[in-house]
Image (cartoon, helix red, strand yellow):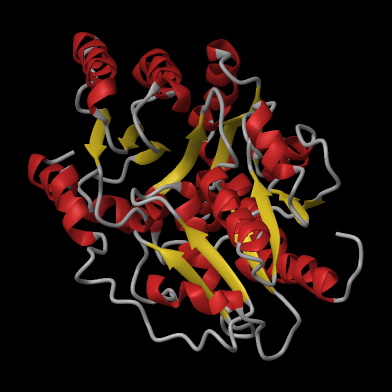
Amino acid sequence: MRPAALAATRLSTSALADQRPTAAKEKARDIDVGRLLVVAPNFKKRLSGVTSTIIQLVPLQARTLPIASLGTGLTPHVPRMRWKQVPGLLRRPEARSFRIWHARRNVEMIGGLLLRDLFRAPLKIVFTSAAQRHHKPFTRWLIARMDAVIATSARSGRFLRVPHTVVLHGIDLGTFTPAVNRDRAVAEAGFLGHKLIGCFGRIRPQKGTDLFVEAMLDLLPQHPGWTAIITGRVTAEHQAFAADLQARIRAAGLADRILFLGEVPDIKPWYQRLTLYVAPSRNEGFGLTPLEAMACGAAVVASDAGAYAEMILPDRTGQVVPAGDAGALRAAIQPYLETPGLAEFHGMAALAHVRATFPLQREADAIRAVYDRLWQGEAP
């Protein structure tokens, strides 16, 4: 890749932070609390998968439902109530006998319980669980006191001890779309027409970045038409991990073909340049990146972490391999590098699959059905 093009894609952590909403920028909209029926709290400042879910879902839900978030770290287009309006939640809403408090973290469940049980606010609490592990005793205690529980995948549902509804995440298909001309998009980025294989997300062992690099060190020397790109933030605790990977790449003479781009200001164009996407996580909550890649027309090779196995149709839209298995990951990637037409064929099938199965509207409708069952007095 041309140095100038690579430099243009880099974005430091501080620069990215400048683009995120600050307290001054994210002035809350005026919300009529009397009409408000759903509160989606966001009690974490740092951008996370949960925050991303709220940012995408709440504006869509707000088209047909009086809903607002409460908290920080949100973009200006998210309807949001002010903290000073919280006492208004102690009164019944105009159109229902109670509101719904939709929590996605422990601290948000606690907030809902305090409002409902201590201050007697007319609330029902919904909790969405994405965990792929057994919950700790305190979390189980909290979950047992919810009025309804949603699992983001069948796998996460297996770790719940209460009745629940499975609602898979969706994505905004208006935001994630294929490139008009992928080869041109690659060439404009300075890759000279190479096919791109990518792995996106924070650089850390949990995400399996090392497994991807290991596969690329083995495979790329035999497949000169491909370049690998890795995007994502490196936190202070994982600086040594990332430095070791880059040292291995340099030692193999592949520094110009396995590229760490750091954080990028807009991930969508990078998805659009990919022919193949790899999600090698060792463990995951849900994991949206394969859906985002598929919506941009890329085939996907993923581990069976998170909900990946529930997204991908083996031998049709990509492949699923055991989490943490470097050999299986390499073997699943190799046929695509050998036959780029296979990756393109599976990428077209992936695009059709995501459009049919994972639109964000479908997720919003399924969540609304949970709300409606509570309002109708049915069992959650």
**Residue shown at the point (63%, 36%) measured from the top left:** 131
The residue closer to the viewer here, 152 or 181, is: 152
Residue 132 in view here: no
Judge whether 209 appears above or below 297 on screen: above
The residue closer to the viewer here, 367 or 147, is: 147
Q: Position of residue 325 (x, y in %)?
A: 58, 13
Q: Quadrant of residue 300?
A: top right
For the C terminus, the quadrant is: bottom right
**Residue shown at the point (62%, 45%) measured from the top left:** 346
> Is 286 situated left or right of 203 in this image?
right
The residue closer to the viewer here, 315 or 291, is: 291
> Is 251 situated left or right of 373 in this image?
left
> Is 32 situated left or right of 136 in this image?
left
Residue 19 in view here: yes
Q: Quadrant of residue 64?
A: bottom right
Q: Position of residue 293 (x, y in %)?
A: 50, 49
> Is 315 situated left or right of 56 in this image?
right
For the N terminus, the quadrant is: top left
**Residue shown at the point (39%, 75%) measured from the top left:** 84
**Residue shown at the point (64%, 69%) measured from the top left:** 121
Judge whether 305 appears above or below 322 on screen: below
Q: Position of residue 49 (x, y in %)?
A: 48, 48
Tell me how many marks there are: 0
Q: Where is residue 326 in the image (x, y as percent from the top left)?
A: 53, 13
Furthest-left residue in view?
4
The residue closer to the viewer here, 313 or 257, is: 313
